[in-house]
Image: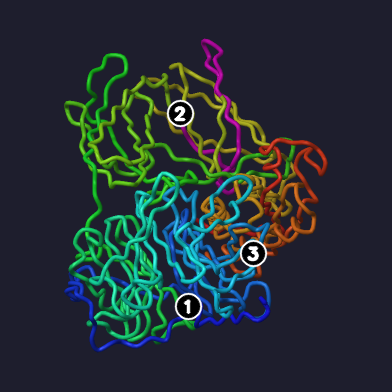
């Protein structure tokens, strides 16, 4: 029977609809165009060329530090057979990078279309449009000729996303698709052609109940028309964006519209107008939490493929689309011992992502290369979180009463850092899930005694900074010792708990030992530049790699990258570490590398090899996207063949021990000379 089912792209409504603007509409809404933005701050729209192919690319959705979308590009063969999901992580400035295939459950590859999706705010639940199927086998409607679309839910767990299950309001006789979840997770908007609507596809909403979802409610004839309403998106402000070809003021094809109060006052439907709408089909509009950046899809003239994704930026937001709800926040800074208010405390407010990284414009991390124990030629590439004082100008200062006031946008998370001289930096991670005013109290603990001594270690020959040099401080009176090391830039910063005179002993393999005297105390912060001589017999060309610890044959280990189980998709952790490698390869423009991916020994050998091949390929693609020449990178996988620890196949290990073997390694084939500062 299933062999007789005809699956037409036009019937499935996964490809661009061939629609035409209507001269009139039976909609009861007051249709108008969006007010023009301030000319001083024009909206910038451009093709998101990083995402697009010559095929159909559409339905973007924000996901965990990046963007997901649907594409008909071929992934497993020469021709595009199914629409599948792709993921592109945002780079450090928030722009999409080269995408890779994303499969929610790799153990069970679906032989049908994956469609538009939405996520809970923690990205632990996904609602996905898919062909009607049972255990992976497509089901037809009662005519036996068409498969309807349904909304399925899947949940993230270990080791993978759960098998999707369909929501109760689906039916074998009509389609439900294009889900969008409200910020509080209590309402799901979607498109459906279920009986009783006003036209082809209408926009519906369904409420969350204690045991699932309730009965869908049609949003009414002010929003819906006798034609098509598709691709709803509910923003953080509560505005509903959707696409329609049935309202009276269409520019042609599907146009993007919005209504600021879709559930309480949907009387005014606003056409987004140019540059968002065109004479073609424009749809799948999304906007970020700040209301300043977003994406949409269009088959307008001038694109790369049949249908492309476009990105936009609006520095002052989009006029008329509403403002997000905010909670007033009162911050109090007190001395933990005395309870007295602290005036002049520096308060920095950052926005964390779910994987521990910080979004926004502040550069929260730097990177360093640390020696790997028992591996003399290996260095671990690690992200190092900056101190509060390195994060730029504070957002707020506490007043004489130790207080500061601000506002937090509802349904967002914040990392609040408070720093004061003489106290330990204090921080709190806040999730705004209430409508109530918020009070945050920071009780500051005394900082340990810290007498600073800093400086630079460099070579006598060329002044080259020396990384990973050890500086051992010995207090002359008490014998108290403290050891620090230089970072990748040859800098050190010691925090010494006793004032007075120290002798500092400097050691670095390949160089003669050196020592110097330093006196520290309150108000005294010495800064020294110490020169080291290479060991006798070392020529000038050998001095530089000795200083920075890098040379042909060095291995850089990136073992703090945590991939999802059995997935090759780059995430924010991988992107941030690879940004460090980009920086290094730009510093050494002649550097050539082998980029090698490894995996743990669990799972089938063949699949592990394929997985590491794909991970290495995706990592190289990102490096090339960031401006590193492709010919400098040889990328390949080694599967499970070279574990770092005892966790070979058949040996029982913890998840953490297995994770040590999931890593990227960079073998420097050629180093070359660095760019001069």
Mark 1 sits on what residue? Answer: 13
The Cα–Cα distance between marks 3 and 1, rounded to whole angstroms, is 20 Å
Decide if residue 183 is in sight here.
Answer: yes
Mark 2 sits on what residue? Answer: 453
The Cα–Cα distance between marks 2 and 1, rounded to whole angstroms, is 67 Å
* Left or right, residue 542 beside residue 204: right
Give x and y (percent) for residue 387. Answer: 42, 37
Mark 3 sits on what residue? Answer: 136
SS at badge 1: loop
Can residue 480 be found in the magenta stretch? yes
Q: Residue at x 46, y 18 (%)?
A: 497
Q: Are marks 2 and 3 in contact (CB under 8 Å)?
A: no
Can residue 463 be found in the magenta stretch? yes
Q: Mark 2 or 1 closer to N-term?
A: 1
* Left or right, residue 493 beside residue 247: right
Highlighted magenta segment, given as a residue range: 453-482
Give x and y (percent) for residue 631. Answer: 66, 70
């Amino acid at each position: 029977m299933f062999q007789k089912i005809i699956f037409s792209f036009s019937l499935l409504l996964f490809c661009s609809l061939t629609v035409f603007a209507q001269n009139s509409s039976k909609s009861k809404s007051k249709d108008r165009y969006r007010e023009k933005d301030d000319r001083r701050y024009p909206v910038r729209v451009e093709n998101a060329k990083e995402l697009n192919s010559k095929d159909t690319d559409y339905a973007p959705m924000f996901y965990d530090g990046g963007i997901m979308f649907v594409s008909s590009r071929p992934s497993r063969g020469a021709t595009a057979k199914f629409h599948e999901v792709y993921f592109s992580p945002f780079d450090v400035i928030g722009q999409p990078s080269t995408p890779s295939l994303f499969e929610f459950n790799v153990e069970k590859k679906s032989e049908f279309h994956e469609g538009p999706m939405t996520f809970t705010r923690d990205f632990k639940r996904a609602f996905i449009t898919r062909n009607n199927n049972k255990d992976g086998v497509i089901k037809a409607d009662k005519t036996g000729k068409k498969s309807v679309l349904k909304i399925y839910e899947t949940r993230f767990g270990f080791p993978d996303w759960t098998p999707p299950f369909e929501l109760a309001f689906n039916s074998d006789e009509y389609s439900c698709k294009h889900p969008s979840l409200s910020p509080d997770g209590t309402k799901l908007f979607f498109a459906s052609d279920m009986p009783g609507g006003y036209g082809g596809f209408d926009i519906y909403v369904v409420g969350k109940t204690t045991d699932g979802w309730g009965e869908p409610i049609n949003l009414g004839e002010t929003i819906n028309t006798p034609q098509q309403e598709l691709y709803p998106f509910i923003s953080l402000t509560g505005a509903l964006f959707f696409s329609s070809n049935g309202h009276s003021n269409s520019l042609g094809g599907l146009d993007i519209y919005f209504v600021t109060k879709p559930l309480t006052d949907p009387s005014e439907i606003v056409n987004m107008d140019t540059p968002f709408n065109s004479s073609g089909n424009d749809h799948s509009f999304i906007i970020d939490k700040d209301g300043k950046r977003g994406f949409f899809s269009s088959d307008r003239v001038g694109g790369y493929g049949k249908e492309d994704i476009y990105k936009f930026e609006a520095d002052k937001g989009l006029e008329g689309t509403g403002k997000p709800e905010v909670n007033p926040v009162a911050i109090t800074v007190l001395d933990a011992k005395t309870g007295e208010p602290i005036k002049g405390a520096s308060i920095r407010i950052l926005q964390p992502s779910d994987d521990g990284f910080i979004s926004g414009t502040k550069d929260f991390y730097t990177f360093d290369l640390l020696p790997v124990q028992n591996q003399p030629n290996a260095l671990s590439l690690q992200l190092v979180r900056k101190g509060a004082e390195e994060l730029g100008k504070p957002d707020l200062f506490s007043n004489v009463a130790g207080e500061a006031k601000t506002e937090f946008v509802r349904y967002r998370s914040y990392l609040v850092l408070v720093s004061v001289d003489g106290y330990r930096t204090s921080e709190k991670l806040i999730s705004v899930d209430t409508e109530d005013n918020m009070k945050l109290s920071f009780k500051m603990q005394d900082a340990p005694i810290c007498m600073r001594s800093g400086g630079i270690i460099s070579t006598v020959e060329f002044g080259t900074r020396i990384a990973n040099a050890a500086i051992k401080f010995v207090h002359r009176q008490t014998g108290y010792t403290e050891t620090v090391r230089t970072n990748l830039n040859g800098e050190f910063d010691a925090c010494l708990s006793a004032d007075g005179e120290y002798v500092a002993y400097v050691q670095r393999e390949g160089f003669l030992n050196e020592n110097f005297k330093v006196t520290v105390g309150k108000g005294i912060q010495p800064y020294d530049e110490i020169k080291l001589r290479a060991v006798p017999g070392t020529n000038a060309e050998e001095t530089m790699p000795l200083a920075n610890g890098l040379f042909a044959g060095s291995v850089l280990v990136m073992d703090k990258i945590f991939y999802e189980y059995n997935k090759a998709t780059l995430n924010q952790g991988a992107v941030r570490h690879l940004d460090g490698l980009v920086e290094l390869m730009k510093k050494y423009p002649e550097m050539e590398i082998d980029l090698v991916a490894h995996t743990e020994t669990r799972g089938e050998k063949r699949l592990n090899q394929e997985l590491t091949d794909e991970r290495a390929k995706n990592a190289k693609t990102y490096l090339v996207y960031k401006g590193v020449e492709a010919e400098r990178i040889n990328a390949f996988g080694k599967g499970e063949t070279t574990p770092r620890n005892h966790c070979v196949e058949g040996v029982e290990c913890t998840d953490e021990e297995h994770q040590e073997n999931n890593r990227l390694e960079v073998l420097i084939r050629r180093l070359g000379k660095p760019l001069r500062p």
